[in-house]
Amino acid sequence: MKIATYFMPYFFFCAMMQVHSYDYDLIIIGAGASGTIAAQYASHYNKRIAIVTGSKSITKHALCSDIPLKTLINIAQVSIIIDKAFELGVQIDTKTKGFDYIFDHIRQVVANSAYLYSAKHLPDGNITLLAGNAHFIDTRTVSINNELFTADKFIIATGGEPYVPLIKNIEKIPYLTEDTFFNLTKLPKSIIIAGEGPLGIEMATALNRLGVEVTLLTKHGLILPKYDFELIEMQHQLMKMEGINIHYNMRIKDLEQQKASIKTFCRDTYAKEYVFSAEKFMLALNRIGRTKGLNIESIGINTYRDGIIVNNKMQTSIPNIYACGNVIGQLFTLSRVGYYQAQIAAHNACKAFWQKDAIANYSNTSSFIYAARPLGATGLTEQDARKKYGKKLLIYRFSYESFTRAQIDNTTDGIAKFICDTSGTLLGVHVLGAAADKIIDSVRIGQNFPSQFADYLLELRTSPNYLDLVWEASKRTESDIERNIFNTIMQYIRKIIPI
């Protein structure tokens, strides 16, 4: 009796640690970018892992990613460089293959890039591939081709699909989306693009630069409404100068196919009617989570219009089921957050009980848009910072015209904007111009701005450099920081101990 009592805690611990007889420790549903990253990361935890590949080929996964669009943008940028060469005194004798070659080139890039998404990059031995579409039976069981598989944990990474609004006769029109545009074999002569977000802006800019007559329709009174208002107004003017026709506050009511063109019937906020006509019509709206066929509602997974609802651990309303990537909606547009989310989901699904949860932190999430001028953003916009901090802000604007690197590169039509609170903490950075991506990637939101670039001139840097914009702003901030006792002490401490 005494012996049994002595060993009782041990028996209780063993019972608590009893291993369930599941087929796998983790099943990942979706073999796109996020699913593959999750599988690669999870493989380090010595777990039995399966990844459901779905019905799409690897090439189709890549074709529905941002690879085709970024390739099109790159082609358009090359076209602009050739056009501007004469302004710099360079005459180029081009032997073009014609714009019809563009789609052949894009498909070749997609085919080459598809390898990066393939299962060949998954570790051998501990990851099983399950071909087919998964359908949840309960919180521990999925059906794939009528065969049941069980797992302790699941990660849903099925990606997204274009959002298609309710528009009269849209089902009768061969409309284009991000997923179908690159199935074309040649550029259209004209196109109507519906969408004021990053996708619509990038498509409109690239196609316009390649000679397509572009009409851009927005449902808002401005383009890129989530970005800093000052910079998007400048972007708007630059896009108009390049020849893009932008019409604001448009509600698309009806579509009609007429021979070789598509008519788009719209109404603005004042009930005024408009009719636009073009060879092609494209929906360039946000992507929403692809959840059809998963049967997630029946097992209690909560969703919203854009996808699956998760917490900051990438956990759904069912604790053993996680989700990541576009299936949870495009919360942070144009950032590689899907990869970040995949790693968090994989860690939390596979970690040992003594390990800490990984928590998603988006404070330094950045975005970058290729438009008339590159636009980079991270942190709070000025309008959002004003709402939160009122007038207690330090805001610095620097024109590219005042910097040597921009003069050398002939990129003087740009502006860099830095937003800080009165203690010098960086709240937001917004850049319209060359090297915008490098500038926003060089800073950290939520940290003291002057201290981030305190030793900039002491480093062996290529000079002149676009990061001179950031250094100049940080020095200006240091001289303008509110002179109170706390800030004075903090500045003294930073001189002794770098923070």
Image: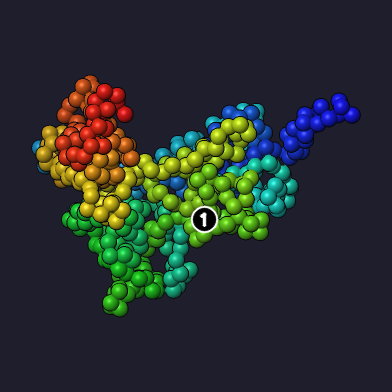
In front here: 414 or 317? 317
In front here: 255 or 286? 286
From this viewpoint, is residue 474 visible?
no
Q: Identify which residue is drawn at 57% across, 50% down.
A: 316
The answer to whether residue 446 is above or below residue 204 is above
Q: Helix or strand or loop: what does disc 1 sit on?
A: strand
Q: Identify which residue is drawn at 34% across, 74% down.
A: 265
Q: Residue furthest right?
A: 1
Q: Which residue is mark 1?
A: 307
Q: How is the image coloured?
A: rainbow
- Residue 332 shown left or right of residue 86 in the figure: right
The answer to whether residue 1 is above or below residue 35 is above
Q: Identify which residue is drawn at 33% across, 73% down.
A: 266
The answer to whether residue 32 is above or below residue 385 is above
Q: Amino acid at mark 1?
A: Gly
Where, by quadrant of the figure, is residue 48 drawn?
A: top right
Q: Identify which residue is drawn at 27% across, 28% down.
A: 494
Q: Quadrant of the C terminus?
A: top left
- Residue 138 shown left or right of residue 333 in the figure: right
